[in-house]
Amino acid sequence: MTAVAAATRPVAPADRRAVDRWAGTGALVRVALRVERVRLPVWLVAVVGLTAVSASSEADLFPDAASRAARAELMRSPAAVALGGPGYGLDDYTIGAMVANELGAWVSLALAVMSVLLVVRHLRGAEESGLLEVVRSTPVGRDAPVLAAVVVVTLADLVTGLALAAALVGTGLPAAGALAFGLGCGLVGLTFGATAAVAAQLVAHARTASMLGLAAIGAGFALRAAGDVRAPESGSVLSWLSPFGWSQATRAWVDERWWPLALPVLASAAAFGVAALLAERRDLGDGLLPERPGRAHASGRLTGITAVTLRRLGGALAGWAVGVAALCGLVGVLAREVVQFVEDEPALAAFFPEGSGAAADAALSRYLLVAVALAAAAGVQGVAAARVEEVAGRAAHVLAGPVGRVRWLGAQLAVVLGEVAGAVLLGGLVMGLTAASTLDDPSLVGRLLGAALGQVPALWAVTGVAVLVLGAAPRAFALAWAYLGYVALTAMLGGVLPDGSDLASPLRYTPGMPAEPMDWPAVLVLGALAVSLVSGGVLAFRRRDLLA
Amino acid sequence: MTTDPTTAAEAVAVRGLVKAFGRRRALDGLDLHVREGEVHGFLGPNGAGKSTTIRVLLGLLRADAGEARVLGADPWRDAVALHHHLAYVPGEVDLWPNLTGGEAIDLLGRLRGGLDPRRRADLVERFELDPGVRVRAYSKGNRQKVALVAALAADVRLLVLDEPTSGLDPLMEAEFQRCVREAAAQGRTVLLSSHILAEVEALCERVTIIRAGRAVRSGTLDELRGLTRTAVVVSLRDPDGALAALRAAPGVHDPGHVDGHLRLDVDAEALDDVLALLPRFGVRGVTAHPPTLEDLFLREYGEPVGSPR
């Protein structure tokens, strides 16, 4: 028996080499790829497929130079610059330039979110659940989990980027631009994945780390938007501070330059280095930022399910509301530029026969839709949180007490539905106040608040779909996220997608106020739909087995 | 590295270990000595610092002060080299939810540098584990079996087990005990942290009891028993006279009537005198039993921290 022979031999530190810190990385990469064998391909197919469909639909929608030139004029507006990109190649708006300008930011955003969630799942998520404790008790180096996450997220982003390039070449776009576009988007994802690796070292909980990573994405997006609005067609310093700006600076399909791709590579390498340094020095399970001590007794306000849900989700939902309000405020501030822009460009007057005010209204209602999509994401997350309670066994704990199922789920849904509606109303109010002051039109406050109110039934309907999935098919909750992705993309990509692609989205049927008038029948039907979806989900939940 | 001859035969040598989390001192000068080839019981109430100690020994936490050696190596600095020679089972096992139990066992084995396929098959059968089920569908006990099979099938010198049987049923508990005895017979060292005192009593040659981050007792079970009192139950013709005499006798604790018998605890060194005193009162029956581990345990924790031994 070798164990006996070895009994008195101490483990020789001579076995110890510098590479020990990385030992086991290969095995961890293989297991991570196995664990992600479904999730990553789904992301890849969704991102690449949607991009390819949008690109070919742009080619159909704008077949000739004249229609593309008209489109380019629209894209010069600050609102479009903020939402899309700096507008390289607007003077000769080819399909490629159009794809880069109007889709690049969104594709990068999707890959950034994918990368943040992936990295946090494999670092802090595994650490929080105790998986890393078992893994690290084997001969696996202290830096190996970070390095494995680097390899996996790099593979995910580069493979997706190359697949994007290949798919776009398949739609007939030039290869050089496709490569610049695909690599650019993939490297944005990688940069935010690396940022998330640092966040995963700083805080003790995976949820907090994900929120930090997503907040970094939001900040990067806002920086680029603000920078590009200040200096369209080149980008100001602010744009150069944002990874989104780096990928767009490749000027895909216009006049490719490759050196900006070095920026995300360097930034990612630096961030991963910091993450590895932090991981090497700290205790497992520990965050660098301290945890607040809590109270030993429940305060008088912690009275029941509603109060617990507020405590659990209040912070996250408030964060979403702040994001919605920030977006709306930015749009309101920019409203003046939209009007100015239309007044300066007589060529655009044809699009807005009612005058430049109509242009502002159109921009405001379009952004309000984006805000609603953001709030719907908060709603689906809130419903997903109820499912987490169930899977973790906390629901069983509560339901074993004198609490009925309808009350348990209903109280949580009331909090979620109330908060998302509040977020959109807050957004409408903020957009109204800012737009009213920049455009000097007090009536906008009331009109935008009304517009936001008109969106609430559609918002609840999207959330209601998630409730229905929770009740009827809880193991397939990914469907709820997929539906949200569909709703959000059709809302954000608006006119780019083929006509009718948003038929299954409630947001298609809401009145586009303030540009369009109130449509009572549509709002009432959507309201009835929302009520049936939510109550159907609750009823189905009452009849089914509890998960786990 | 200088090999200290006195510690060369120690699989685990810990001296004055300190680990603080913020202001809370989880370990406060802990000593722990585990000899090569022994099964060592590691006992303590919740929050005493057992898991913290084990995490330091695995190089997952870095000690603030003190010295720790595992198989002669520094657990933090030489973690990877050391982990080739040990296997760990935590009390709360969490593995990759969408891999099967069998995949998780093989993967942990590969990370440790391979496992014996025959031993793996044998253990899977003995623990009645279905290796084709995904980890997320296992109960707590079955997840623990996955980790146990992976650890016991690994060709390692040291097994570090942190409450490894908290989710197992009595049949599996018995199987676990057989496995630990086999491991010991093969010359492996086992550090077993447990709340199940019967398990520790059945398996461990030596025991360390810790409390508030410090070792309060350490030694063989016999040594620990010798330090404390024997419980004596006597049936007497004149119990009241005996009670009065016993109250006055040195080394007798808490004498009193229980179900018509007289019950008392006697210090080891006073046992001779007390038994000599009893015949005067007409002994009809007597039982005496050494303290169980449970008695030791309760006594250790019944006293305030820092009281003299």
Image: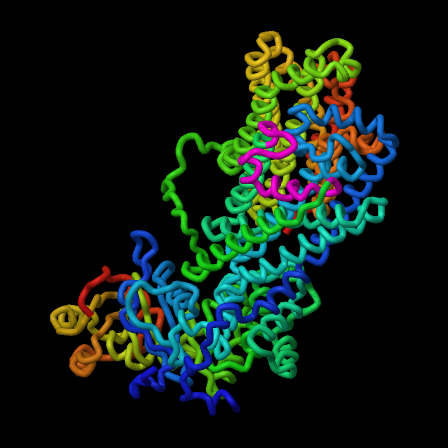
The C terminus of chain B is located in which quarter? bottom left
- Is residue A253 located in the magenta-colored stretch of the structure? yes
A461 to A383, vertically: above or below: above
From the viewer's side, name the closer residue of A516 and B149. Answer: A516
Percent x, y of residue A302: 45, 33
Left or right relative to A522: residue B259: left
Say left or right for A78 vs B179.
right
Task: Residue A382 in the image: state x and y as whole percent.
Answer: 60, 36
What is the quadrant of residue A355 in the picture?
top right
Q: Please say which color scheme the image uses.
A: rainbow
In this orientation, which residue lies closer to the viewer: A232 or A211? A232
Q: Nearer the viewer, residue A412 or A4?
A: A4
Q: Please say whether residue A135 is visible from this viewpoint.
A: yes
Question: Count of labels shown?
Answer: 0
Quarter-of-image position of residue A240: top right
* Relative height, residue B99 to residue A267 (above, below): below
Does residue B77 appear left or right of residue B106 in this picture? left
Residue A246, quarter of the rendered image: top right
Q: Which quadrant holds the N terminus of chain B?
A: bottom left
At 73% across and 19% down in the image, what residue appears?
A512
Read off the magenta span: A228-254
Magenta span includes B225: no
**Residue A357 shown left or right of residue B109 in the figure:** right
Q: Position of residue A54 (x, y in %)?
A: 80, 38
Q: Residue at x 23, y 60 (%)?
A: B304
Q: Is residue A536 visible?
A: no
Q: Position of residue B88 (x, y in %)?
A: 49, 71
Residue depicted at x 37% and y 64%: B62
